[in-house]
Structures are given as structure tokens and as C-alpha cells.
Image (spheres, rainbow, N blue to C red):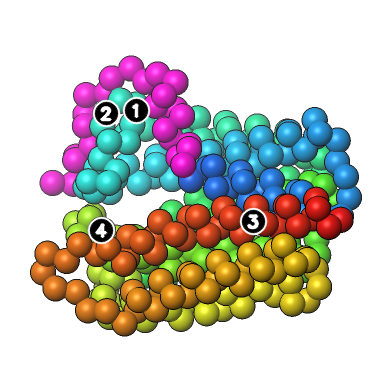
Amino acid sequence: MTSLSVINTQTLPADWRDFLALTKPRVMSLVVFTGLCGLLAAPVSIHPVLAFTAVLCIALGAGAAGALNQWYEADIDALMKRTQGRPLPAGRMDRQSALHFGVGLSFFAVLTLGVATNWFAAAILAASILFYVLIYTVWLKRRTPQNIVIGGAAGAFPPMIGWAAATGDMSLLPILLFGIIFLWTPPHFWALALFVKTDYANAGVPMLPVVAGERTTRTQVLLYTLPMAACAIAPFALGMLGLIYGISAILLSSVFLLLSARVAFRTTRDGDSMAPEKALFAFSIVYLFVLFGAVAVDRMVLA
């Protein structure tokens, strides 16, 4: 059986909900929020209409990348329980429609951002889409267990895009915000991979637990959490952000570190519920939302 033959060959008419599903709304919400916080952290004001347009373009760019990812990965999505219900493997949409939607949305997002704000921000948005689609999806994901490590850069661009949309330039703070997300990505996804590794193995995706085993993965989760915590505290330590952010970063990173250590030093048995891994995965999402929310609040209150 070829990889494409597992996709439902009877394609039903797609509706707006299928196109929305292509954009990965839950992932997009985090991307949009970190982009907004990057914009709010900028030391200059931006007209509310332009700010809204910038955030909308970040959302559309993320959605376009998600659509192109699903277009390319329709074959492996059909093999994984977690993704079998997506529009393409479920047969609710043909691949050409997904491709056209993703490409069209990409161009619209980049061009609109360039016209509305500046072309520097638009260039970063374009780079993030290309990185996610070509570097992560096409090149890395099926070839190396380091796919998440390198590919994580794609999801780390939004704070830089938001900052650039407001200022037209770049500085150390948005680069540190990029670094937080970049270093957060491996423990976040490896925690997930630990309790759905059978799915990845069935689809032939070389995630770290599948290729290197649980013990190595657990160690790597902790090893990446340490520099992530340091990067998260750095904006406060360097005087770029104030006490609201500093307290939030220290407390949140301490909890993240404790949960990561619990995952790193445990051994599972057959039938294990993987509760610590699921707890880390769930908290990692809360961590990023609250941490970046603290960036925005700190700037607005103490500016």
C-alpha cells in the first residue's frame, strides 16, 4: 500500500469549517497571542487599526503554514489517530484545494502586512511560513529526530514579527522572546510524543522517543528546560522588563522545571497512564500564554 492510498479517495464537498480546520486554530491562537505580545512590548505606539491588521496577518500567515503542512502531510495524517479526522485524510477536501488555499493565504498575509506596516515585518512573516513549510515539514520532519528542535524556530517568529510591525527594526528583547519559544518547543512536543509515540511510529515519523527511546527523550526534556528558563528570566535580569514579568517568569519557570524533572527521572511500566507527561504538556501551553501575557502587562503598567 502506498502512502497516498490510505487517504480517503471519496472526497466530499468542503465547507468553511474544513478550511478553518486547515489553519490549525488551536495552534494559531498561541501564535497570534505571542505576536500580539511582541507588538505590545515594542517601545513605540501603533495605530489600533494597523495593530489589528498586523495581528490578523500573523494569524493568516500561521493559518497558511498550517494548511500547507496538512497538504503535504495528508498521507501520514491518515495513519495517526490524532490526525485522522483532519479534512484531507477524512476525505472532506481534495489536496489541490488545500494547496491553493495555503498558497493564496500566504501571499495575502505577507503582502497585506507589508503594505499596512512595513516590509521588514512582512519579510520575517514570509520567512516564518517558508521555514515551517520547506525546512520543517518537507525537509526535517520525516528525516531526523531533531525535527522539532530546528523546526521550532518557525513557531518562534511571531513576537519578532509583532515587534517589527510596530518599530520597523529589531532589538534584543524580541530576539529573547524568540529564544523562549524556540527552547520551549522541544520539551513541549517531546512531552506529547512520549504519550503518543505509537502514533508517530505507525506513521514513520522519527520523533525522538521512537528513534532514541524514552530514557533519552526524558533527559532531553530536562536539558532543554534549563536554557529555556534562563532565557525566560533574562529580560528581567537584563532590565528590559520589570517586576511583574520577573516574578511571573521565575515562578512559571520553576514550576516548568519541576514538572520536567518529574518526567526526566521516572520510569514507566506497561499500561502507565503517563500522567506526569500529560501534566507537563498541558502546563507548557499555560506557561507560554501566561509568560507572554506578563510581557504585555508589564509593558503597559510600567511603561
Q: Secondary structure at mark 3?
A: helix
Q: Secondary structure at mark 4?
A: loop
Q: Nearer the viewer, mark 1 or mark 2?
A: 2
Q: Secondary structure at mark 2?
A: loop
From mark 3 to mark 2, how far is it between C-alphas?
Answer: 37 Å
From mark 1 to mark 4, how far is it between C-alphas?
Answer: 27 Å
State whether residue 234 is above or below residue 119: below
Q: Residue 58 lies in magenta, yes or no?
A: no
Determine the image quadrant of residue 259.
Answer: bottom left
Q: Residue at x 85, y 51 (%)?
A: 167
Whichever of labels 1 and 3 marks the residue nearer the N terminus, that label is 1
Quadrant in which the C terminus is drawn:
bottom right
In the drawing, does residue 92 fall left or right of residue 139? left
Residue type marked 3? Phe
Q: Residue at x 70, y 75 (%)?
A: 234
Residue 75, image x and y in percent? 28, 44
- Neighbour tally class for label 3: few under 14, some 14-19, many 20 plus, Cα within 10 Å: many
Whichever of labels 4 and 2 marks the residue nearer the N terminus, that label is 2
Q: Nearer the viewer, mark 3 or mark 2?
A: 3
Q: Residue at x 75, y 48 (%)?
A: 39
Circle 3 is placed at which residue position? 292
From mark 1 to mark 3, how far is it between C-alphas?
Answer: 37 Å
Circle 4 is placed at which residue position? 196
From mark 4 to mark 3, how far is it between C-alphas?
Answer: 28 Å
Whichever of labels 3 and 2 marks the residue nearer the N terminus, that label is 2
Residue type marked 2? Gly
Q: Residue at x 63, y 68 (%)?
A: 249
Residue 154, image x and y in percent? 56, 57
Circle 2 is placed at which residue position? 91
Residue 10, image x and y in percent? 21, 24
Residue 175, image x and y in percent? 71, 66
Circle 1 is placed at which residue position? 94
